[in-house]
Image (tube, helix red, strand yellow):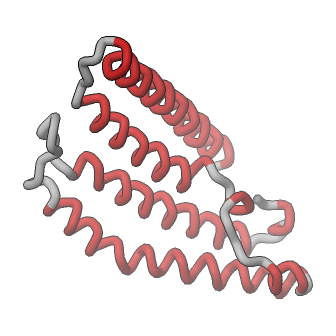
């Protein structure tokens, strides 16, 4: 299980790096055409925005660890380990259930956006919004895995 998780994480890292490199190159092309050649390209802005949305959504759900997210841990840090464990299970369970409950509505909206097109490239808007659906599914999976780890012996050593 841990080997598969590491393989998945490394794959996501490589894809994120490639997407960010593509974003940077497209952004530099945009600057070059706009300010050097005085002939702005319209597609570069749209592709940059789509790549940025995907990088943020997938990166936030996979690459940023639980401890790196913004949290309010004043009470959590002041209680003993068993209570922290219960707080973590309840908090993670709540977020996971909320995402799970709202997933059908989000999928419905993503399917609705297939009809709409992006302004320049005329791509379905779902290309943009699917990133949030992927984010939600990955957060749900991360929540289930975290709850599983919190219920196992040695949970204190888990990230």
153 left or right of 60?
A: right
Question: Residue farthest to the left?
Answer: 115
159 left or right of 77?
A: left
- The mark tally for this picture is 0
Quadrant position of the C terminus in the picture: bottom right
Give the x, y percent position of residue 130. Answer: 30, 53
Which quarter of the picture shows residue 137? bottom left
- Relative height, residue 144 to residue 12 (above, below): below
User: 61 or 141: nearer the eye?
Assistant: 61
140 left or right of 46?
A: right
> What residue is drawn where x is 22% and y is 30%?
42
Give the x, y percent position of residue 60. Answer: 55, 54
- Relative height, residue 50 to residue 157 (above, below): above
Which quarter of the picture shows residue 39? top left
- Relative height, residue 159 to residue 34 (above, below): below
> What residue is drawn where x is 11% and y is 53%?
116
């Amino acid at each position: 299980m841990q080997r598969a998780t590491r393989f998945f994480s490394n794959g996501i890292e490589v894809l994120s790096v490639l997407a960010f490199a593509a974003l940077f190159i497209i952004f530099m092309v945009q600057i070059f055409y706009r300010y050097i050649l005085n002939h702005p390209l319209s597609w570069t802005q749209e592709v940059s925005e789509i790549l940025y949305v995907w990088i943020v959504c997938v990166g936030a759900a996979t690459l940023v660890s639980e401890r790196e997210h913004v949290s309010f841990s004043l009470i959590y840090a002041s209680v003993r380990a068993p209570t922290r464990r219960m707080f973590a299970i309840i908090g993670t369970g709540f977020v996971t259930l909320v995402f799970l409950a709202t997933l059908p509505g989000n999928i419905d909206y993503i399917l609705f956006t297939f009809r709409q097109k992006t302004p320049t490239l005329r791509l379905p808007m779902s290309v943009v919004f699917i990133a949030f659906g992927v984010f939600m599914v990955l957060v749900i999976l991360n929540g289930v895995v975290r709850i599983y780890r919190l219920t196992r012996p040695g949970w204190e050593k888990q990230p």
